[in-house]
Structure formats: C-alpha cells, structure tokens
C-alpha cells in the first residue's frame, strides 16, 4: 500500500471509509503520532480518492448515482482482476477443476493426484513419485492443490487465497505471487506425500504459506502495506492444531491434510523472512 495523506487526528472517518469501499478503492487508515494516515492499494486511483476526501471534508454527499455506481463497479471489478492475474487464475482453475470433476469424476481426480492411482484386486494401488516424475508427469507435483472434494472445502480455501493473494500480488507483483504458488504448492504436496498419503488435495497448504508470508511482512515491515488481523492468525493456527487432534475426527474433520498445512506454513515463513529482510536492508 502507498501513503496518501494525513487526516485530522480525531475525525470520524466512517462515512469516508464506506464511500471508498463503495467506489472499490482499496485503502487503510492507520493511527500515527501526527494524525490518521490514509493509504491506498492502487496508486492509479489516487485522483479519485483525493476527490472523495475533498468532498468528505466539505460535507458533500458521497453516494453514487445508481446507474453510475453499477457501471463503476463493473469497471472497477475488471481493473481489480487485471491487477491480480495470478490470484484470479488460481481461483478460476480451482473452480473449473471442481466443475469438471462433476462431469468426469474419478477419471479426472486420478489425473491430478500426486502419483497415479488405480484399483487392483479390490485394493488401492499407486505409483512411486520418482517413477512418476521420470515419466514426465511433473505437473503432479502441483496439481493436487487444485483438487477440492466439496463446496465448503473449495469456498473456504479460495476465500483465503483471494484475501491474502491480492495483498501479495498488489504489493510484491505477480512474479512473486506465482513463485509462492509453485513453491508452496509443491512443498505442501510433498510434505503430505511423505506421510504415506496419496489421495489428498486442496489449496489449504498454499493458504497457510500466504498467511505466514503476509503475517511476517506485516510484523517485520509495518509500513509495507501488508495487513492481517491478529485474531485471524490465531484462528488459522488454532484451526490447524485442532484438525490434528482426535477431537477433530470425532466431529467429522479427521481427513485433513495436516502435513500439507505445516509444509505450506514453513514455506511462507521462509519467504516472508526472506522478502522482509530484503526490504529492511533497503531502508
């Protein structure tokens, strides 16, 4: 995020915040020693933001006309997607794969698992990762991340991909986001495979990598523009620990790729530390 201007220390900015969100202007307001600092996610919206602030200061109404609002929302949504193409593509591929599973069923699933899977003599059989890779099926290292086995599984993961991915891609670029996807996805999948599990999937390993990355950037470089509520971090880590317990199994959450979560978290901590250290050295 980028700092724009200081607002009066004790001013009520609630209406301004609402107007900025209605106009789809990503922003934050932080309390500083000399006032409230207004930040913007996309510098290209700088002029529009300043115009709204001026109208807010003069007490003018900040509502959009209905037709203009609808047109502006569509344009803004398209602009937002263009700013985060990797994050949007991750979500799109996951949704398309989920829909295609409904059409092709197990045939597609076994194409995307980390190693080939089949049935022999009424038992599940599967190949070895080394043989799979040597045969050229390298996509299997990443493809399980795009497999989801239910609507809740899909929605929960993609919600957090959008939340964290937008920050990383907007603030550090699409190349960094793509690198995180590949490294975290492969790292999480291999961590799960090493436990002896082959039938697993989901973006949750990547989600925990993004969480750790954003959290470390926000903690070590507070003015970097990254932000994650502390209670969200506590919830996500608490959920990861909960799914590792016997209690999770008793309420229907036993079949969770816990090692993928841990693998992704470790990757995110490493990348977050690396990129935050680089940022600190520059300053």
Image (cartoon, rainbow, N blue to C red):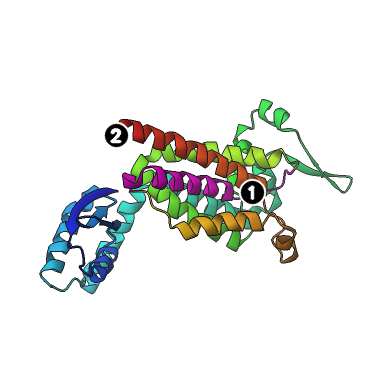
Q: In which quadrant of the rendered view does residue 266 lie?
A: top right
In the displayed structure, 96 sits above or below 182; it is: below
Q: Is residue 103 visible?
A: no
Percent coordinates x, y for residue 193 in the rendering: 70, 40
Q: Residues within 10 Å of mark 2 (few under 14, many from 20)?
A: few
Mainly helix, strand or loop, the magenta region? helix
142 vs 3, left or right, is right
- Which quadrant holds the C terminus? top left
In the displayed structure, 22 sits above or below 40; it is: below
Highlighted range, magenta? 197-225
Labels 1 and 2: the sequence-earlier one: 1
Q: Which mark is residue 201?
A: 1
The residues bearing labels 1 and 2 have C-alpha atoms spaced at a distance of: 40 Å
Looking at the image, the residue that sits furthest to the top is 134
For mark 1, give the secondary structure.
loop
Residue receiving disc 2: 283
In the displayed structure, 33 sits above or below 129; it is: below
Q: Is residue 126 visible?
A: yes
Q: Residue at x 71, y 32 (%)?
A: 129
Percent coordinates x, y for residue 115 in the rendering: 70, 38
Percent coordinates x, y for residue 150 in the rendering: 63, 60
Looking at the image, the residue that sits furthest to the left is 58
270 vs 107, left or right, is left
Percent coordinates x, y for residue 135 in the rendering: 68, 27
Looking at the image, the residue that sits furthest to the front is 33
104 vs 37, left or right, is right
Taking the magenta stretch, the answer to whether it contains residue 66 is no
For mark 2, give the secondary structure.
loop
Q: Nearer the viewer, residue 265 or 157?
A: 265
């Amino acid at each position: 995020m980028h700092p724009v201007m200081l607002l009066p220390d004790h001013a009520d900015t609630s209406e301004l915040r609402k107007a900025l969100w209605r106009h789809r202007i990503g922003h934050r307001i932080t309390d500083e020693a000399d006032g409230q600092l207004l930040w913007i996610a996309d510098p290209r919206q700088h002029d529009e933001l300043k115009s709204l602030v001026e109208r807010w200061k003069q007490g003018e109404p900040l509502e959009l006309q209905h037709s203009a609002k609808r047109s502006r929302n569509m344009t803004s949504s398209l602009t937002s997607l263009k700013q985060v193409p990797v994050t949007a593509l991750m979500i799109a591929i996951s949704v398309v794969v989920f829909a295609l599973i409904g059409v092709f069923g197990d045939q597609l699933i076994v194409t995307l698992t980390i190693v080939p899977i089949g049935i022999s003599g009424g038992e599940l059989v599967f190949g070895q990762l080394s043989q799979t890779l040597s045969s050229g099926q390298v996509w299997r290292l990443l493809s399980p991340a795009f497999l989801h086995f239910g609507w809740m599984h899909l929605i929960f993961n993609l919600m957090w991909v959008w939340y964290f991915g937008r920050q990383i891609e907007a603030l550090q670029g699409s190349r960094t986001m793509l690198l995180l996807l590949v490294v975290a996805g492969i790292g999480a999948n291999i961590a799960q495979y090493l436990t002896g599990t082959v039938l697993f999937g989901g973006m949750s390993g990547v989600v925990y990598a993004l969480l750790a990355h954003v959290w470390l950037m926000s903690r070590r470089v507070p003015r970097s523009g990254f932000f994650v509520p502390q209670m969200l971090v506590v919830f996500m880590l608490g959920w990861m620990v909960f799914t590792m317990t016997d209690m999770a199994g008793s309420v229907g959450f036993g079949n969770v790729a816990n090692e993928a979560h841990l693998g992704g978290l470790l990757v995110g901590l490493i990348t977050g530390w690396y990129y935050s250290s680089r940022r600190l050295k520059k300053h």
